Image (tube, rainbow, N blue to C red):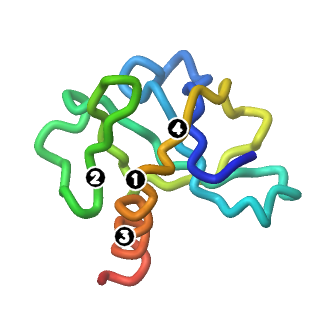
């Protein structure tokens, strides 16, 4: 699994509002049976809750999506959907949001 790979959301229950998950876990830990992911929400599902630095808006497949870093989660690798691209181009934004979540800075 490559860091910053975007996967389809395999959950039929949440796929409409959260179409994708971005893998933010280091490739050095690929041996683990889980991956740490950030859900990518459609903006209408987030509404006024978005905080630009903590929940950056990213473009993927021509659509603006909100990276809900506060919902960072570990999920079993087998539950990841199909890989459909990557967000390596916004790596710094994602790392800054994760840093803010963990350190407050």
Badge 3 local density, few (<14 within 10 Å), some, or many (20+)? some
Q: Would you identify the image quadrant in which residue 12 lies?
A: top right
| Residue lying at 19% horizontally and 49% vertically, measured from the top left | 50
Which residue corresponds to mark 1? 90
Q: Regarding mark 4 in the picture, which secondary structure is present there?
A: strand
Which residue corresponds to mark 2? 56
Rounded to the nearest whole Å, what is the CA distance between mark 3 and mark 4? 18 Å
Report if the CB atoms under discs 3 and 4 are less than 8 Å apart: no
In the image, residue 84 sits, relative to residue 101, either above or below, namely: above
- Of label 2 and label 1, which has the lower sequence position? 2
- Of label 4 and label 2, which has the lower sequence position? 4
Which residue corresponds to mark 3? 96
Mark drawn on residue 21: 4
In the image, residue 65 sits, relative to residue 102, either above or below, namely: above
In the image, residue 78 sits, relative to residue 48, either above or below, namely: above
| Residue lying at 72% horizontally and 33% vertically, measured from the top left | 79
- Of label 3 and label 4, which has the lower sequence position? 4
Of the residues tagged 1 and 4, which is closer to the observer?
A: 1
- Of label 2 and label 3, which has the lower sequence position? 2
Q: Regarding mark 2 in the picture, which secondary structure is present there?
A: loop
80 left or right of 63?
right
């Amino acid at each position: 699994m490559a860091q910053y790979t975007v996967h389809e959301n395999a959950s039929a229950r949440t796929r409409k509002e959260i179409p994708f998950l971005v893998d933010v876990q280091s490739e050095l830990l690929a041996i683990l049976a889980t991956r740490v992911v950030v859900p990518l929400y459609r903006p209408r599902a987030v509404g006024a809750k978005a905080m630009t630095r903590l929940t950056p808006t990213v473009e993927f497949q021509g659509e603006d999506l909100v990276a809900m870093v506060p919902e960072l989660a570990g999920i079993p690798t087998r539950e990841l959907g199909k890989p459909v691209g990557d967000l390596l181009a916004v790596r710094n934004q994602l790392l800054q949001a994760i840093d803010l979540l963990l350190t407050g800075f």
